Image (cartoon, rainbow, N blue to C red):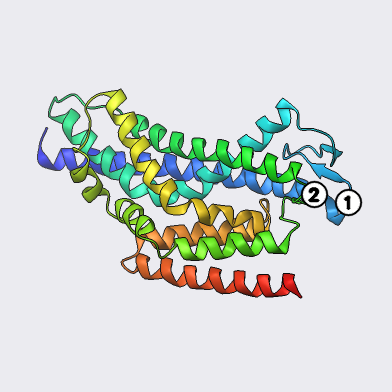
Amino acid sequence: MTDSALETVLRRDRWIVGGAIGIIVALAWGYVLWLARDMDMGGMDMTGFRMIPAGIGIMLPADEPWRAIEFAYVFLMWAVMMVGMMAPSAAPMILMYARVARQAKAQGKPFAATGWFAAGYLLAWSGFSLVATFLQWLVERAALLDSRMTLASNLLGAVVLIAAGIYQWTPLKDVCLVQCQSPLLFLIRHGGFRDHPRGCLLLGLRHGGYCVGCCWLLMAILFVGGVMNVLWIALLALLVLLEKLTPVGRWIARAAGVACAMAGAWLLVSSLR
């Protein structure tokens, strides 16, 4: 294959992978918007009840224990939401992998499909979603979550905001963010691309693990603004994107940390009045 023909194939491959990522993100956001509209219930008073995020208007008494199907619906909500929020910031890494994979195959070298890497990345966020679902169950059982999945305690909300703000300045945040900001640096530090599915899946899982380490407390802020508050979801997704994909991402992270800490302090003072 000539160099020009190879470049044509590579360009087409990038469009295919990029388009696939775009479709997945669009579907995820469509699902989130559908759930948010269902959770709104036209502004009805939901006191004494809780909504199950199934998109079909299912309500249960607030004091009724969770069932397995409700746990599954909440987990699905978190998992799809994380895909919509995090996949755009992972796109450069996935596109780089697709490019190298195509070059390797064109040269007759073995190489694992790009989907294995993406699956590993999403598996890490699925693990986070499982933890978030369990945490939501605990908070709801303690009667600290209202019908719209928002913390009913301003004091607890203040603690979450202040903790998220402080974390934005920690060395652990720095380490994780650096791994997410530079795909090439990440690959160099972790042995480069893998030519077999298992290694590729684990590489994606490791990359996703760093992203979870970078953003987990930011995601916890959703409990303060409302887990199904589309505006909060969009703002946090934009913040994550700016942190990871811009040259001044570290300073954006720190500025967001200051803003979170200040908002938390204000909420703390308000709750103690």
Residue 126 rendering spot, x and y as whole percentages: 51, 36
Amino acid at dot 2:
Ser
Q: Is residue 220 left or right of residue 152?
A: left
Residue at position x 86%, y 44% from top?
49
73 to 86, vertically: above or below:
above
Q: Which residue is mark 1?
A: 47
Identify the element where label 1 is drawn: loop
| Label 2 with label 1: CB-CB less than 8 Å | yes
Q: Is residue 273 left or right of residue 214?
A: right
- Residue nearest the viewer, comparing 29 with 39: 39
The C terminus - image quarter:
bottom right
Q: Which residue is mark 2?
A: 147
Q: Quadrant of residue 141?
A: top right
- Residue nearest the viewer, comparing 216 with 241: 216
- Residue nearest the viewer, comparing 182 with 91: 182
Residue 75 rendering spot, x and y as whole percentages: 62, 35
